[in-house]
């Protein structure tokens, strides 16, 4: 799928990881299987799809072939907006999406990407663990079940032009995903004008000069080849790219209690394997970019200015994207040790 790969999917597609703990059980009649139609942007032969197929093998074995995932990969079902629309319409049953797709289902989950708040993996884990039930309720209220969370590296700023402090972005042309209010809000708070477009358009935008600055993980910058059009990379990250797998509640309810449990457990195993892969490969990608000549920008000297912008952005998003109580709950979760 070349440049049109999604940030989350393209990043995970860099490595392969097989699911642990598959158990051999007697085969059941495949004709009676419940098929879960799962939309993904990952290319059919990618390592991410190998991970997904390993998940499917475990799911089939542990449900005695009563439940099976049928993948529609390579963006054959469109982009994330299309995925969510088709699941709601009954044309698909489940999908793998980033925070943007998750936010189309339950907008408040975007709190996990509020700039400057969750910047380390242990913070993200605490937030997911402590607020898991609250987030699950949000999805259920909107007709979905969150199967498992995922991630795709640390989100940082990349640019063709030199930058160090927030106000430097005012003279640049930063990209903001047209379906993501968070980074657009961040850029607007700085006083810059975000260029809104979809992920498939970004590489072309960098080529033509419509864009010169993007938020991405090192993993995604390499996978999407964006790094070839950029010179500078922030050492400090302002968040973590997250995503996950969701299924329509009505489809989930068709499964027996046992098979629901197996679906959730195997999905979680796949997601955690994906996390290990993404964290490892994001770190390797960062080091690789430095070796390739990418200039590392140490923004620590202007930390107070970046922190002030992040704080103001979080405040501006409160009440529009997520509630004050949810923001405070996440802040408390990441502060607990």
Image (cartoon, helix red, strand yellow):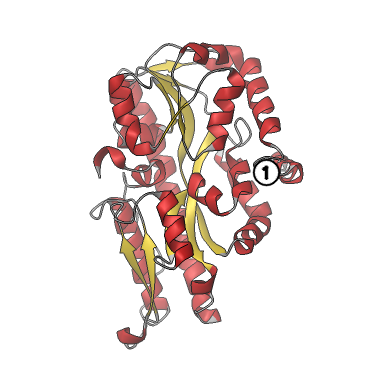
Density class for disc 1 (Cα within 10 Å; few <14, some 14-19, many ≥20) is many
Callout 1 secondary element: loop
Q: Is residue 136 found left or right of 280 in the rendered image?
A: right
- Residue 259 appears in the rendering: yes
Direction from residue 117 to residue 121 in the image, left or right:
left
Image vertical order of residue 142 relative to residue 195, above or below: below
Q: Quadrant of the N terminus?
A: top left
Above or below, comparing residue 85 to residue 29 in the picture: above
Give coordinates of residue 337: x percent, y percent: 70, 43
| Horizontal side of residue 228 vs 145, given as left or right | left
Determine which quarter of the picture holds residue 294.
top left
Q: Farthest residue in the front direction?
A: 89
Q: Does residue 270 appear in the picture of this structure?
A: no
Could you say where residue 133 lies in the image, as x and y percent from the top left?
Answer: 66, 60
Q: Residue at x 63, y 54 (%)?
A: 129
65 or 100, which lies in front? 100
Residue shown at 68%/53% (left/top)? 130
The answer to whether 279 appears left or right of 185 in the picture is left
For disc 1, the marked residue is 322
What number of labels is visible? Answer: 1
x and y percentages locating residue 254 in the rendered image: 50, 79
Question: x, y percentage for residue 270?
Answer: 43, 59
């Amino acid at each position: 799928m070349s440049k049109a790969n999604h940030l989350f999917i393209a990043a995970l597609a860099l490595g392969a990881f097989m699911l642990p703990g598959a158990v051999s059980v007697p085969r059941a009649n495949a004709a009676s299987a419940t098929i879960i139609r799962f939309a993904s942007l990952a290319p059919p032969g990618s390592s991410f799809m190998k991970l997904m197929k390993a998940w499917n093998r475990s799911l089939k074995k542990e449900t005695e072939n009563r439940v099976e995932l049928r993948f529609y990969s390579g963006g054959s079902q469109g982009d994330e907006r299309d995925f969510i629309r088709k699941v709601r319409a009954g044309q698909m049953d489940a999908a793998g999406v980033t925070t943007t797709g998750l936010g189309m289902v339950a907008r408040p989950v975007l709190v996990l990407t509020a700039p400057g708040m969750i910047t380390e993996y242990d913070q993200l884990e605490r937030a997911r663990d402590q607020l898991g039930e609250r987030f699950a309720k949000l999805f259920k209220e909107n007709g979905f079940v969150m199967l498992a969370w995922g991630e795709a590296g640390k989100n940082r700023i990349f640019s063709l032009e030199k930058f160090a402090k927030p106000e430097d972005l005012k003279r640049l042309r930063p990209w903001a995903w047209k379906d993501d209010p968070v980074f657009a809000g961040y850029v607007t708070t700085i006083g810059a004008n975000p260029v809104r477009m979809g992920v498939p358009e970004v590489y072309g935008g960098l080529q033509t000069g419509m864009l010169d600055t993007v938020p991405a993980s090192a993993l995604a910058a390499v996978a999407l080849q964006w790094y070839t059009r950029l010179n500078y990379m922030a050492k400090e990250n302002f968040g973590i790219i997250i995503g996950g797998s969701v299924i329509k509640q009505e489809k989930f309810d068709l499964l027996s209690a046992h098979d629901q449990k197996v679906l959730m457990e195997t999905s979680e195993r796949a997601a955690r394997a994906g996390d290990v892969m993404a964290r490892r490969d994001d770190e390797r990608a960062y080091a690789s970019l430095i070796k390739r000549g990418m200039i590392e920008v140490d923004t620590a000297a202007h930390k107070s200015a970046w922190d002030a912008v992040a704080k103001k952005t979080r405040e501006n998003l409160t009440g529009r994207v997520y509630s004050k109580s949810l923001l405070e709950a996440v802040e408390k979760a990441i502060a607990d040790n």
